[in-house]
Image (tube, rainbow, N blue to C red):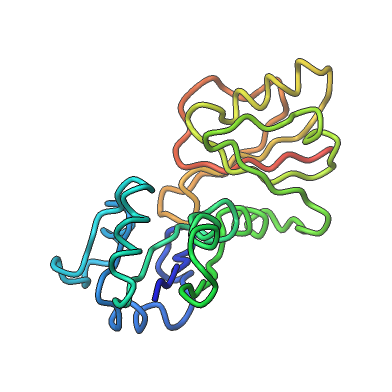
Amino acid sequence: MITVLGIGPGDPGLRLAGTQQLLAQADVVIGSARQLKTFPKIPAEKAMKLPRLGELKEYLTANSAKQVVLLASGDPLLYGIGTWVTTNFSEQQVVIVPGISSIQYMFHQLHLSMNNAYFTSSHGRVPDFDFLLRHDKVGMVTDSQLGPYEIAQEIKKRGLHRTLYIGERLSYPDEQISKHDETTVEDREYGMNVVIITNA
């Protein structure tokens, strides 16, 4: 059985109850080095660093009799690895345990309703900005290739005005949330960030 376990945005206090029990029952726990580091009590012989997806599929197929927990940052089904797992394995082989997404966390930190918001990601892809900017409220997970500065440039290019909230290292002790418009976003590196765009 493959359990895709949402572990939230980072702070252990934001994980759902039952997380430790699932980890204790697992034969193998798979995650990135950063994810595994947040669970220091997992025995070394049980922890497996996340391989490339092709290798992961081979491993999960070959070890279908084992109880495998696959760690997922945020929520597994909001631009997470849960979508890949459900595409490649049957419903009978998979359990998805939700987590608090970084987008959800950011909206709550801002006291901003998620109603009627459009959620997307720029991880490994270029969003359709003409479509995206038709929405009054957008939550976006970004990466180092297309982040806050590039988003601001796309807004400026279209002659639009938007408010951008940038959340970095959300839920960690050094969390930073800043408010900008399309003209004030700095061209710099943004660590582990989420951008919320509002038409207000």
- List x then y, in percent, for residue 59: 29, 59
- Give 61 or 175, whichever is nearer the viewer: 61
Q: Horizontal and vertical percent for residue 175?
A: 47, 48
At horizontal 34% and vertical 54% (from top left) the residue drawn is 56
Q: Position of residue 167 (x, y in %)?
A: 56, 44
Q: Quadrant of the N terminus?
A: bottom left
- Residue at point 73%, 39% (across, down): 197
The quadrant of the rendering that contains the C terminus is top right
Residue 151 screen position, x and y as percent: 66, 27
Residue at x 45%, y 68% (from the top left corner): 4
Task: Locate residue 148: give its quadrant.
Answer: top right
Residue displayed at 47% across by 30% down: 144
Quadrant for residue 71, please give it.
bottom left
Asked if residue 143 lies left or right of residue 56, the reply is right
Viewer-side residue, 166 vs 46? 46
Of the pair 84 and 29, the residue shown nearer to us: 84
